[in-house]
Image (cartoon, helix red, strand yellow):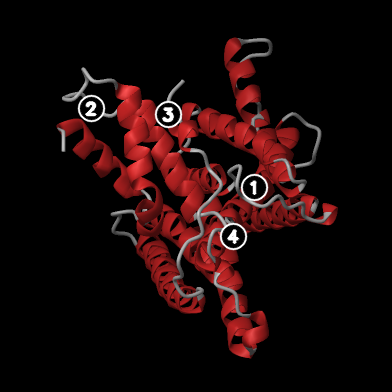
Amino acid sequence: MTTLEDRYRRVLRLLPAAYRAEREEEMVSAFLDGAGPDDENARPRWPEIAGVAALAVRIRLGGATPRSAAWGRTVRLTALIGLAFQATMSCVYLAQTLGVYGLLPLPFDETPIGDPASADRLWHVTRDLSSLLWIAAYVALVRGRPRVAKATAALGLTVYVLSGTEAAESFVLVVATLALLAGYHRDAPAHRHPGRLAALPLVAGAAVFLVMMMSTWAMTASSRSPEWPGTWVWVWSWLPPSGLFCLALLVACAVCLAAHLTGPRWRSPSVPLALAILTVPVTLARLSYLNPGSDQATDTMNAVTVAQAVALVLTGTILTVIGTRTLPARRTQRKPAIDVDDQRPA
């Protein structure tokens, strides 16, 4: 065995064992034929490695076996839930932007950043309107257009990172975008959700916006009290986007657990596993809000944040156990109709 052949076999370990047992020799032979006789000490090219990695994702998240089909549904549901929450928050951000420019009433005075017609004003307006990208990505995904959803989500994540927003709040966006890119491949079954599902972020966003505005108004009124901040220190940890997602996840996890205990009819591995996956970035985002301050208000907020993280870890662990136990048993994998030549660089 030449050094190059050994290196190709190492790359092919990314593929499931059942698939390698059927196709490894054929793929190694095809790769060596493409390398040529004078490249025995060369290394696999990056396009070849990327092709094998993409093939491994398609097989593991495809429908070759009931187990891989379940994992594929899990990853796609993770992307759908993550984009749904971000689309909801994007509706809130757009409403706040309209309020800043006087198109919606706000319970507080806030002026636009930068002078009119300045580059600073243009940049902030562009950043605020970039929330539309997440709404477009979610709607495209719901309506069965994953390619459009991938492009807009990737662009939205790029703008989000370049805008200098807190890295902690981007954890959920990164996980949702990666799940979108991995779960919706060419071998994934096409699915178009009901149109009313596309309007869900608008309705939820309007509700969240009203709650946040009422909370702001109530806090403004309470700040004049000598007992300020009072009970508000118990609320503040739930108001950031990750705090709202934490609340939504805990409610969804409770409903999922109740449905699982109801009977076999409602048991599905994809839902609990998708929720368990999302608890990881939300937990990291919440822990990033811990403040080393020493006053009573800070200590109370830290206690609430730690309680949120503990609740997420516990529910995520329980749902992981439930999901893995309901996964279909491992079976021999059928041979996917994928040509080895497609994995070779042009």
Viewer-closest of 238 and 12: 12
Question: Which mark is first along the chain, 2 or 3?
Answer: 2
Give residue 341's position: percent from left, percent from top. Answer: 47, 32
What is the crowding at mark 3: few (fewer than 14 residues within 10 Å), some, or many (at least 20)?
some
Give the residue type at disc 3: Arg
Question: Which mark is first along the chain, 1 or 4?
Answer: 4
Q: Separation of disc 2 and disc 1 at Cα?
A: 46 Å
Q: Which residue is mark 3?
A: 344
Asked whether disc 4 touches disc 1, contact meaning CB atoms under 8 Å apart, the reply is no
Give the residue type at disc 4: Arg
Q: Secondary structure at mark 2?
A: loop
Give residue 144's position: percent from left, percent from top. Answer: 74, 46
Viewer-closest of 33 and 176: 33
In the image, is residue 199 above or below residue 343? Answer: below
In the image, is residue 334 above or below residue 179? Answer: below
What is the crowding at mark 2: few (fewer than 14 residues within 10 Å), some, or many (at least 20)?
some
Question: Which mark is first along the chain, 3 or 4?
Answer: 4
What is the crowding at mark 1: few (fewer than 14 residues within 10 Å), some, or many (at least 20)?
many
Give residue 188's position: percent from left, percent from top. Answer: 62, 50
The mark lying in front, picked from 4 and 1, is 4
Question: Which mark is first along the chain, 1 or 2?
Answer: 2
Q: Separation of disc 4 and disc 3 at Cα?
A: 28 Å
Give residue 23's position: percent from left, percent from top. Answer: 40, 48
Q: Which residue is mark 1?
A: 89
Q: Separation of disc 3 and disc 2 at Cα?
A: 14 Å
Q: Which residue is mark 4?
A: 73
Q: Secondary structure at mark 4?
A: helix
Question: Which mark is first along the chain, 1 or 3?
Answer: 1
Viewer-closest of 73 and 254: 73
Q: Which residue is mark 2?
A: 43
